[in-house]
Image (cartoon, grey):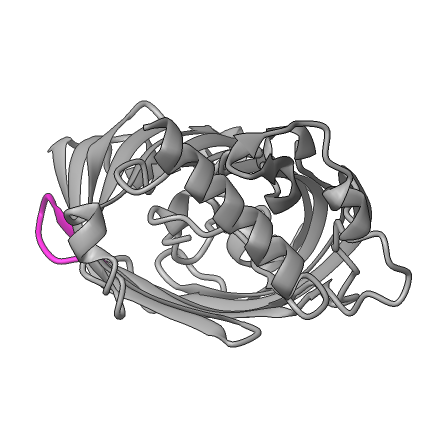
Amino acid sequence: MIRRNIISRLGLAAAIALTAPAAFAQDIHFTQFDMTPLVINPAFTGMFDGQVRAGAIYRNQWASVTVPYVTYGASVDLPLFIERNGDYLATGLQLYKDQAGDANLSNFTGMLSVAYHKFFGQTEHSGADLAVGMQAGYAQKSIDLSKLYFGDEYLNGTFVPATSQEYHLGLGNSVNYYLVNAGISFSQSTSDKFGYVIGVGANNLNQPNDAIEKKQNSQTGLDMRYTGEIGANWIAGERLTLRPAVLYQSQATASEIIAGNEFRYEVSNNPGFQNFSTAVFLGGWYRTGDAVMITGGVEFKGFRIGVGYDYNVSDLNTSSNGQGGFEIAVRYIAPNPLKFANKRTIPCSRF
C-alpha cells in the first residue's frame, strides 16, 4: 500500500512537471445538473416558481481508483425587482469547492449572478420568458506540496525528505483569479401541460491564468467553457410528468453530452403548483463515452431531495469496476404569495 501511494504521488508530481506549461484546467460537472442551474447558465438565475431557491450538492467520484475527487456546492437565488407586467430582475450566489488527489489539489469558487427576465404573451396557461444573465466571481486554487514525493528525494533507494525540486519546477502553493460568465435562455409554456427551455452560455470569458506554476510567462490558463441545453416539462397524465433534457458542454479539447429523461409521479396533488406537491422521481441518463447514470428522489412541500450514481463505461472501467461517482443533493423553493395569487407564472421550470 505504501509503495502504491508513493508511485501515485510520483506520477502526479511528474504530470505537473511535464505538463504545467501547456496544461489547461477544466471546470466541475454534476450528474444532477438540474440541481445546479447557476453552474450551467447564469441566465437560469431566478428561473423558478417561488420566492427564493436554495440548494446544496455533494459529489464523490473515483474512490475505487484513487483518492476520491470530492466536490461540494451551494447556491441561493431569488427575484428582486418585479415589474407590473411580470418582467423581473433576479440575483444569486453560487459557491463550490473541488478537492482531488493525494496533495489535496483544491479549487474554491464563489460567483455572484444577475439575470433579467422578459415575458411575452403571458396568459393563464401559456407564455414565454427571455432571460439574459451575467456572473462574476473569485476563485482560489491550491495544492499541498508537502504531500508530494519528488524523484530527488530518493538516493540509492533511500527516502531523503526536504527536496527543493518543487521550487525548481516553479510551483507555488496557491493562485487566485477572477471569472466572468454570461448566458441567455428562452423558455415557453405552450399549454398548461407542456413547456420547454433552451439555453446557451459561455464561462471563463476572461480566460484567467489559473496556473500554480510561478513563471510569469506561463501559458497555463482556464479555457472558456461553452454550454448548450434543452429541456422540457410534459405532464403526460393525471399524476405522471416526463422531464427529458440534453446538456452539452465543451472546454478546450474536452466535451460531453448528457441525455436522458426523468419520470416524476405525484403521490399527492397540489393542483397548479407542481413544486409544492408530494412526488417521487426516477431518471435515466447517459454521458457519452463515459457513464450510465441513474437519479432518483422525492419532492415535498417545496423540498427536492435527490441522489445520483454514475456507472463508468469508459476505458477506465477495468480499473474502476464500473464505479464512477455518487451524488446527493437537496433544494428548497419557498412559495411566492404572488404566485399563489395567480399574478405571475414562470414558463417551464425544468432547470
Quadrant of the image occupied by residue 316: bottom left
- Seen at 19% across and 56% down, the residue is 317
Number of callouts: 0
Question: Which sits in the foreground, 67 or 46?
Answer: 67
Query: Which residues are the magenta region?
Result: 234-243
The image shows residue 183, relative to residue 38, as above or below, that is below
Question: Which sits in the foreground, 202 or 317?
Answer: 317
Question: Which sits in the foreground, 116 or 216?
Answer: 216
- Seen at 43% across and 42% down, the residue is 7
Is residue 38 visible in the rendered structure shown here? no
Q: Residue 269, image x and y in percent?
A: 17, 32
Asked if the magenta segment contains residue 242, the reply would be: yes
- 269 vs 273, left or right, is left
Q: Main secondary structure of the magenta part?
A: strand
- 1 vs 228, left or right, is left
Asked if the magenta segment contains residue 160, the reply would be: no
Q: Quadrant of the N terminus?
A: top left
Q: Residue 190, image x and y in percent?
A: 33, 69
- Seen at 14% across and 36% down, the residue is 266
